[in-house]
Amino acid sequence: MHAELRLVHGIRCGRKRIDRLMRSMGLTGVYRRRNLGVTCRGPRRPVDPDRLHRQFVPDAPNRVGVADLT
């Protein structure tokens, strides 16, 4: 509403005033969703093979490197 009044009609007024007047009339603006990064839903990346076979306790020291990437 603010952009239309200012750009199309050439009427200058504050954004807060427009917000207050719209609220008093029971009008609300349309909110756009924020782009939070990944929006592309392309093909999924292949899952890496499970080389540990879900055995997180190695038999001997320096045999398996394990990390938590959460």
Image (tube, helix red, strand yellow):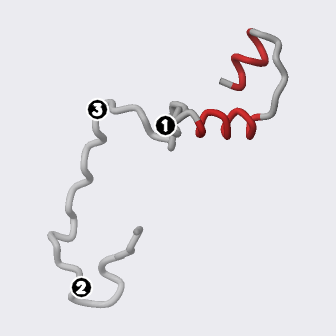
* Front in this rendered view, residue 30 or 44: 30
Residue lying farthest front?
24
Q: Are marks 3 and 2 in contact (CB under 8 Å)?
A: no
The part of the image, by quadrant, that contains residue 45 is top left
Mark 1 surroundings: few (<14), some (14-19) or many (≥20) residues within 10 A = few
Name the residue beneath numbered marker 3.
43
What amino acid is labelled 1 in the image?
A: Arg
Quarter holding the C terminus is: bottom left
Residue at left offset 77%, top offset 14%: 7
Question: Which type of secondary structure does the marked residue at label 3 adopt?
Answer: loop
Mark 1 secondary-structure assignment: loop
Above or below 16: residue 8: above
Find residue 33 and name its label: 1
In this figure, what is the number of numbered marks? 3
Q: Are marks 1 and 2 in contact (CB under 8 Å)?
A: no
Compute the Cα span from label 1 to label 2. Answer: 47 Å
Q: Reply above or below: 25 against 50.
A: above
Secondary structure found at label 2: loop
Q: Nearer the viewer, mark 1 or mark 3?
A: 1
Relative horizontal placement of residue 43, taking residue 50 as reference (left or right)? right
Q: Which residue is mark 2?
A: 58
The earlier-in-sequence mark between 3 and 2 is 3
Residue at 41% across, 68% down: 69
On screen, residue 69 versus residue 17, left or right, reads left
Residue 17 lies in quadrant: top right
Q: CA distance from mark 1 to mark 3?
A: 23 Å
- Whether 49 is drawn above or below 55: the answer is above
Mark 3: give few (<14), some (14-19) or many (20+) Cα within 10 Å: few
Query: In the drawing, does residue 14 fall left or right of residue 57?
Result: right
